[in-house]
């Protein structure tokens, strides 16, 4: 991503969140059931590394999970780092949402019923993004 | 692990190795290709084709090493082989043309040197196979689908021949057969330019030979294929599988072909009658002749495996399984509308049907909340060198999520390679839920071409007749009423919902408006939302809810308005049904929800080259007085129309028109029924 694109992301980062309404609305939706899962069947194909358009592109993985992380602060830090160091942060999220999609970060879903499946999913994504460091 | 290598690293050698490995795997034997041995960038099709077979090699895991094209060995490959560090117990087979003793000695000594042991040589020069190529072509029995109508494959027609292309077209009109044409890329282009997309036509590299072979009961050979490895492999698969083979070329007069095939008319004009009179009544017997022929015996992969000391493979459990699962794949863009529509159809399937989804991550929480398990797909990345790199990973995920004969239901505009190839490779039954109203300027040739992989195309209608267009014809096409979400009176209580909103936002509103202008992916609607919020600020009687998806970008400025609140939800339908005025983009789902649920609406179309024609949809409703159309630039008209709806009788008039509309019956249950028919047909 270009410096201008990261600058634009920084201008949109603010500690403001849309009001969640699911608690009110789900009781009026007969289809609501809340028992589906995110899964990842895998037959162990080879995880190929992919080339970037610009060979100098460097990505790092950032695991974002749990409620104790200030998404706004983290977003600002990562966007600033991306702008200054020309590094592309890829967010690995195990929850429904990372909370950083709305600012324009690339978020990958880490899925699987078991920890082994989730690690395999993360490994696929690391190969896809040529990532060697996940923080 | 059985590892396959080639003596040369030319593109032709890589392709030959890939066809061989793919045939061995189709025969039930797991044979892999060393990922490090693929040096040069592969063509897009080959990248998909090779993906299932690539591996990282650990020397201790190689039980057998098969080297194809051993007579073409070069020094680079010898150095690669040395790096494999082959263990003493590994069996090595070098396959090639060793007619000359000098070649044999040279290959033996060089491989012995780099591998540390003598390979066993398999000489193809004395093969009595009908061809003379260096690479072994194998035949594998393919599961024949038992379709109701006989499928005729026209193999290798040269459609640059004017007489032949017209003749093939006449043949393809026959109602006695389903016609499948397999030819080269140029012939396919010529055909589609002249005759469009109403016949299933493939070029040789479009799918692996074993996937194309599964599409025929009768094969008519129309030109010499001796030098065409893919076409030859298709023919061998069909011979081994017991398809009836008709030779309509003039090339095979030496009698070798007559042992497994029937000579057919060389004039394409006589082919239809010949097949109907001579072949169709005798398909079974002719198939037996093919299956028991000398050629079938020679090229059978099982026989080749014996030469490699490979035990017969275990029976593949996938072919024996009885329960059929349905995988819904809603994609394109973010995929929310497609996912919502699929979930409505999936809800109507019988409870015993095992249903899952593969979708982009932003759709999965919604699908989970409706009780469906979901597999995340990976979105396209602009950073990657190839625009389909994400789709290669999605291919792995879709393939892993399915078993042979499952059902895949795709909802989207563009059939990704991952979907196309998963259906072919897994021998899935494919169904495409294909919403219409394409823009006239769109190029949908790839989409229409790929319709051939689906057994059924379900077209959900638009509410208004003039919006329904036909893009293709044929028996696989089925039309259903609009697929729409409607609130269920068992749980929906408009008054109660509005009361809860009053409490939540501490605003004692009379009017509730809902603004839903899209996620901003297709077009930025920040200015329109600002204009709406500014207008609402003058109205103390109104609560305006701006509904966003949890992943949507939200402008910080929107949070500063008092009468407008930014909300997020997975359950927008009850909110829309409870409001007094809906200000919305004109996507299929939101449009039909407004029309079917009697909600007065102002539509602001989003027009992007890859989207459906939202303006046409809004115009159709506006022309009937069933909604208001406001163009994105008409900001002052927008405020005026909002006030007319809320203060005057305009919203009431619209409601009255909506109540009188004669709308087609919704198609949720009919679409599910059409899917269920295929499930039960397994």
Image: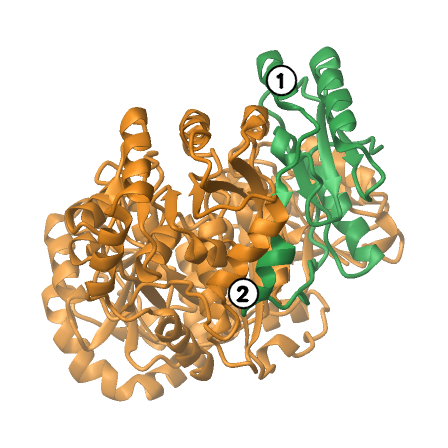
Chain colours: A green, B orange
Mark 2 residue element:
loop
Of badges 1 and 2, the one in the foreground is 2
Tally the numbered discs: 2
Determine if residue B529 is in view: yes
Dot 1 and dot 2 residues touching (CB under 8 Å): no
- What residue does disc 2 label? A29
Kindly identify which chain the residue marked by label 1 belongs to.
A
Q: Residue at x 64, y 42 (%)?
A: B7
Say which of A31 and B636 sits in front. B636
Give residue B559's quadrant in the image: top right
Determine the CA span between mark 1 and mark 2.
37 Å
Q: Residue at x 81, y 59 (%)?
A: B63
B14 over B181 or under it: above or below: above
Q: Position of residue B615 (x, y in %)?
A: 25, 40
Q: Is residue B615 left or right of residue B404?
A: left
Quarter that holds the N terminus of chain B:
bottom right
Question: Which label was assigned to residue B639?
Answer: none
Kindly identify which chain the residue marked by label 2 belongs to.
A
Q: Residue at x 56, y 51 (%)?
A: B501
Determine if residue B100 is in view: no
Label 2 Cα neighbours within 10 Å, binned few <14 / some 14-19 / many ≥20? many
Q: Residue at x 70, y 48 (%)?
A: A46
- What residue does disc 1 label? A11
Q: Is residue B296 left or right of residue B314?
A: left
Give residue B382's quadrant in the image: top right
Answer with mark 1 or mark 2, whichever residue precedes in sequence. Answer: 1
Q: Are marks 1 and 2 on the same chain?
A: yes
Mark 1 residue element:
helix
Q: Position of residue B441 (x, y in %)?
A: 23, 36
């Amino acid at each position: 991503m270009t410096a201008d694109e990261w600058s634009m992301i920084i201008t949109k980062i603010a500690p403001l969140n849309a009001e969640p309404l699911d608690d009110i609305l789900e009781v009026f939706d007969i289809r609501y059931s809340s028992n589906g899962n995110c899964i990842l069947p895998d037959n162990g194909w080879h995880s190929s590394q992919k080339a970037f358009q610009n060979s100098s592109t460097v990505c790092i993985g950032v695991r974002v999970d749990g409620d104790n992380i200030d998404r706004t602060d983290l977003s600002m830090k990562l966007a600033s780092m991306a702008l200054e160091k020309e590094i592309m942060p890829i967010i690995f999220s195990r929850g429904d949402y990372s909370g950083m999609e709305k600012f324009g970060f690339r978020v990958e879903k880490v899925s699987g019923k078991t920890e082994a499946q989730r690690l395999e999913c993360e490994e696929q994504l690391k190969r896809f993004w040529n990532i060697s460091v996940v923080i | 692990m059985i590892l396959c290598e080639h003596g040369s690293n030319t593109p032709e050698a890589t392709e030959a190795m890939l066809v061989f490995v793919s045939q061995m795997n189709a025969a039930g034997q797991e044979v892999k290709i060393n990922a490090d041995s693929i040096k040069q960038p592969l063509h897009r099709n080959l990248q998909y084709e090779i993906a299932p077979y690539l591996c990282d090699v650990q020397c201790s895991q190689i039980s057998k090493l098969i080297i194809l094209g051993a007579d073409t060995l070069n020094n680079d490959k010898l150095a690669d082989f040395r790096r494999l560090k082959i263990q003493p117990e590994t069996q090595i087979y070098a396959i090639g043309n060793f007619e000359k003793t000098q070649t044999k000695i040279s290959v033996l000594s060089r491989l012995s040197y780099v591998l540390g042991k003598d390979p066993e040589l398999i000489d193809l020069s004395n093969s009595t196979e009908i061809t003379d190529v260096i690479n072994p072509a194998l035949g594998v029995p393919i599961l024949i689908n038992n379709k109701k109508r006989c499928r005729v494959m026209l193999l290798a027609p040269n459609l640059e021949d004017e007489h032949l292309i017209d003749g093939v077209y006449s043949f393809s009109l026959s109602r006695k057969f389903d016609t499948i044409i397999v030819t080269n890329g140029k012939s396919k282009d010529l055909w589609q330019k002249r005759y469009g997309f109403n016949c299933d036509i493939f070029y040789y590299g479009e799918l692996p030979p074993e996937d194309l072979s599964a599409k025929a009961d009768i094969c008519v050979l129309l030109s010499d294929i001796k030098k065409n490895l893919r076409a030859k492999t298709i023919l061998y698969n069909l011979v081994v599988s017991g398809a009836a083979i008709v030779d309509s070329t003039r090339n095979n007069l030496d009698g070798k072909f007559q042992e497994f095939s029937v000579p057919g008319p060389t004039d394409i004009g006589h082919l239809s009658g010949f097949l109907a009179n001579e072949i169709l009544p005798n398909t079974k017997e002719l198939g037996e002749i093919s299956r028991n022929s000398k050629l079938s015996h020679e090229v059978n992969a099982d026989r080749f495996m014996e030469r490699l000391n490979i035990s017969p493979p275990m029976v593949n459990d996938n072919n024996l399984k009885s329960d059929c699962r349905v995988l819904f794949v809603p994609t394109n863009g973010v995929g929310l509308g497609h996912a919502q529509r699929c979930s409505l159809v999936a809800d109507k399937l019988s409870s015993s049907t095992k249903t899952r989804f593969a979708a982009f991550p932003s759709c999965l929480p919604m699908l989970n909340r409706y009780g469906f398990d979901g597999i995340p797909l990976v979105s396209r990345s602009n950073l990657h060198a190839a625009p389909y790199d994400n789709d290669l990973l999605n291919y792995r995920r879709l393939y892993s999520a399915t078993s042979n004969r499952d059902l895949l239901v795709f909802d989207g505009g563009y059939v990704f390679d991952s979907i196309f190839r998963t259906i072919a490779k897994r021998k899935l039954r494919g169904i495409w839920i294909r919403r219409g109203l394409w823009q006239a300027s769109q190029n949908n040739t790839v989409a229409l071409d790929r319709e051939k992989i689906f057994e059924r195309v379900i077209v959900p209608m638009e509410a208004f007749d003039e919006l329904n267009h036909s893009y293709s014809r044929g028996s696989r096409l089925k039309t259903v009423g609009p697929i729409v979400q409607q609130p269920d009176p068992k749980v929906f209580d408009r008054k109660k919902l509005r009361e809860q909103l009053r409490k939540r936002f501490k605003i004692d509103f009379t009017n509730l408006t809902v603004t839903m202008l899209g996620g901003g992916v297709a077009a930025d609607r920040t200015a329109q939302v600002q204009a709406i919020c500014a207008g609402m600020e003058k109205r103390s009687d109104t609560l305006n809810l701006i509904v966003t998806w949890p992943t949507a970008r939200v402008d910080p400025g929107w949070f500063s308005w008092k009468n407008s609140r930014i909300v997020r939800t997975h359950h927008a339908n009850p909110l829309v049904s409870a409001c007094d005025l809906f200000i919305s983009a004109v996507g299929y789902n939101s449009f039909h929800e407004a029309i079917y649920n009697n909600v007065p609406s102002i539509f602001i179309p989003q027009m992007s080259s890859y989207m459906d024609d939202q303006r046409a949809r809004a115009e159709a409703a506006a022309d009937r007085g069933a909604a208001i159309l406001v163009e994105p630039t008409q900001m002052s008209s927008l405020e005026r129309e909002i006030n007319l709806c809320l203060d005057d009788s305009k919203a009431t008039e619209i409601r009255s028109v909506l109540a009188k509309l004669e709308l087609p019956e919704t198609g949720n249950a009919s679409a599910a029924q059409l899917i269920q028919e295929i499930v039960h047909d397994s």
